[in-house]
Amino acid sequence: MLDLIKTNDSVGVLFSSPDVDAARGFFAKKSRAMTDKRMSVSEAVSGFIHDGDYLASGGFGGVRIATALLHEIVRQRKTRLGLSGHTATHDFQILAAGKCFDRCDIAYVVGLERRGLSPNARRYLESGAVQMTEWSNATLGWRYKAAAMGLPFLPARSVLGTDVFRYSAAKEIACPFTGQKLLAVPALFPDVGIIHVHRADQYGNAHVDGISIADYDMARACKRLILSTERLVGTDEIRSNPCLTFIPYWLVDAVCEVRYGSYPGNMPYEYFSDEDHLSEWLEAEKDEAELQRFLDKYIYDTRNFEEYLALKGGEARMKTLRGLEPLKRCQ
């Protein structure tokens, strides 16, 4: 892990360097060859996610999250990760259950929106085991954007004068043209990112239908990128509508075909979230011993995501959830 960098204007800590030249040096060494990147979830996590890495998780809240990859991170007992808590709900809940991270850039965490708060995630943060730096959803998203643009920071007019600024690692600066106060939001280059998509080819060219939020910039900011996909398709299908290629192959290190890979989250136009199972998570978390039994049953004692799905009803359950989700994409 890089040495922690303290700022003068706020009390938060930068968990990764915004050094653009160093990041460019890494990206320059990545192959641009169109190689076959298909592999299992287990192979992708063991090969590209290392203890101590800084991790970014795609999707939004419980929508289009890479659950299969998240389960495997817990199953392989990855530790000391840094984590970007940008609109993180069930993904944060999973990683907190596995105690996989010890530092976190926080925008939206612990809460599962209308479902309430995760008791275990709250315990984990309140235990003091996690070092935290505060951001808003917008400023944390703009950190990805700065990295994607190849800039060490972006100026913003947001959160100045608030406790979010005080506990962030941003800096107050003066506009060189007007002298007005601005916020300097530092670039974020995660060591590795995980994103679940609707379709991808063997090289990593990927399509996403519907909500994208920060994933466009996140994919371009991450030094390594693992995709899980609902369907593996031929490159001809990708090329038939190149305007939909949300993530191009040269950003991607691994492609894992995982049908229903966002379950129990919502996959737009594919399947609705399993609210019963999410409630089961919340109930199990109320007691630490019960949570451990829950994790043993659904993650540690299963060999893969397919076995987990089978425990929750498999294709029959997914048919029900598909019936709850509008299947027609917006044109």
Image: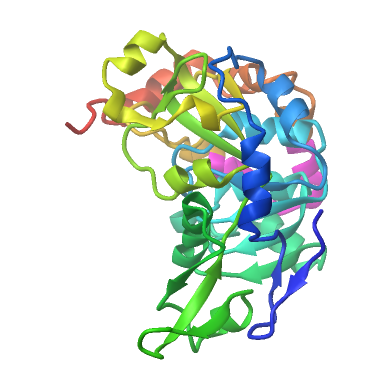
Furthest residue to the left? 331
One can see residue 263 in this view: no
- Residue 117 lies left or right of residue 100; in this view the side is left
Q: Nearer the viewer, residue 25 or 84?
A: 25
Which residue is at a point 43% across and 36% down the rendered structure image? Answer: 266
- Residue 9 lies left or right of residue 58; in this view the side is right
Which residue is at a point 60% across and 59% down the rendered structure image? Answer: 110
Give the total of numbered labels.
Answer: 0
Could you say where residue 243 lies in the image, as x and y percent from the top left?
Answer: 27, 29
The answer to if 32 sits in the magenta stretch is no
Could you say where residue 224 lies in the image, as x and y percent from the top left?
Answer: 64, 36
Relative to 291, does residue 308 appear above or below in the rendering?
above
One can see residue 9 in this view: yes
Quarter that holds the C terminus: top left
Which residue is at a point 50% across and 69% down the rendered structure image? Answer: 136
Relative to 92, does residue 262 appear above or below in the rendering?
above
Q: Which region shows up in magenta?
A: 278-295
Q: Nearer the viewer, residue 78 or 263?
A: 78
Could you say where residue 223 lies in the image, as x and y percent from the top left?
Answer: 63, 41
Q: Nearer the viewer, residue 158 or 182?
A: 182
Relative to 241, does residue 331 appear above or below in the rendering?
below
Relative to 236, does residue 308 appear above or below in the rendering?
below
Could you say where residue 183 lies in the image, as x and y percent from the top left?
Answer: 49, 78
What's the colour scheme? rainbow
Which residue is at a point 35% across and 17% down the rendered structure image? Answer: 238
Q: State the image quarter where residue 179 is shown.
A: bottom left
Magenta-colored segment: predominant secondary structure: helix
Q: Nearer the viewer, residue 250 or 12?
A: 250
Q: State the image quarter where residue 13 is shown.
A: bottom right
The answer to if 288 sits in the magenta stretch is yes
